[in-house]
Amino acid sequence: MCYHASVNATFQQVEASYAKTFVEGSLPLFSNKSDVIAYHHNGFNFPKMPVITSDLNDKLQLFNWGLIPSWVKDFEAAKQLRAQTLNARSESVFEKASFKNPILSSRCLIPMTGFFEWKEETDKSKVPYHIQLKNQAMFSMAGICSKWWSEAEAKEYQTFSILTTAANSLMEEIHNVKKRMPLILAKEQEELWLNKNLGQIEIEAFLKPFPSEQMEAFTISPIISSRSKFKNSPEVLKPYSYEKRDLFS
């Protein structure tokens, strides 16, 4: 699955990479375009992240991670559901109530520089990895999005979910229990993914693992696994070596 991601780039760099600008007034308070967006994002914090939607494909926006379908009745229901919609399985995305409308009409691109996963060792310990593309500093994950109006707050929530698929050979080695990975799009697929006229068969053609030979991964500091240490810092992306332990030590 994909619950931890990195946008190790400034707002300006994201704009340059996609040749699009952020919607005016969309940046967080007290930030500017030269700020790094996030060395580490934890999906369960429901952060605002850059997206390009099929409804406004010439602009960048900031949506909250954790999709809230438009039909949700109240805030409590929305709060519970969004923790379950950080990811949408591509194998069932056309069937699930939360996803079946957005996959057909509200797809989006989610700019990333990388993502994080943990490999389970034979002793059940978990080693964290950062995964990125070899020759592409920034890439797009495939997403679906939704807008939900909170009556209690008189506020609109703009939200998204990341699609996942079966792991490729690289990710099978790292995410070695559930063997899943985010759905990554090639550059030439991005514009077509946002085409609102696609039908189910055409969309299904995208739902395949990204080639492992175009990806790379390295182990990173255990800071990422700590409950007490600050993780949204450059330290979290530094390579870190885990020495093999002697069985008799």
Image (cartoon, rainbow, N blue to C red):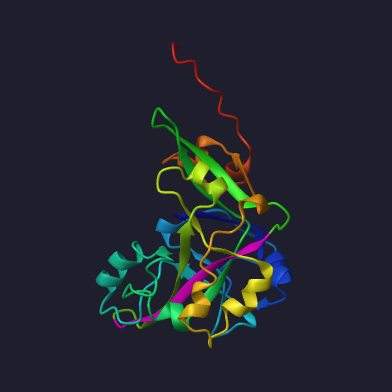
Q: For the view shown, which residue lies furthest in the top direction?
A: 248
Residue at the location (30% across, 83% down)? 151
Residue at image x 44%, y 58%?
43
Q: Can residue 229 be seen at all in this image of the molecule?
A: no
Q: Residue 15 location, x and y as percent? A: 69, 71
Viewer-closest of 126 and 223: 126
Say how many tags the image has. Answer: 0
Is the C terminus in the top left, top right, bottom left or bottom right quadrant?
top left
Indicate the position of residue 91 as horizontal and vertical percent values. Answer: 40, 66
Q: Which residues are magenta?
A: 138-151
Q: Main secondary structure of the magenta part?
A: strand
| 110 displayed left or right of 150 | right
- Is residue 234 placed above or below 16 in the rendered structure? above
Q: Residue furthest bottom?
A: 197
- Residue in the picture at 49% in, 15% down: 246
**148 in magenta:** yes
**Residue 214 drawn at (x, y percent):** 67, 53
In this view, the residue in front, 8 or 142, is 142
Is residue 116 placed above or below 191 in the rendered structure? Answer: above
Residue in the foreground of this view, choosing between 106 and 183:
183
Q: Quadrant of residue 50?
A: bottom right
Q: Nearer the viewer, residue 147 or 28?
A: 147
Residue 58 image point, x, y percent = 65, 83
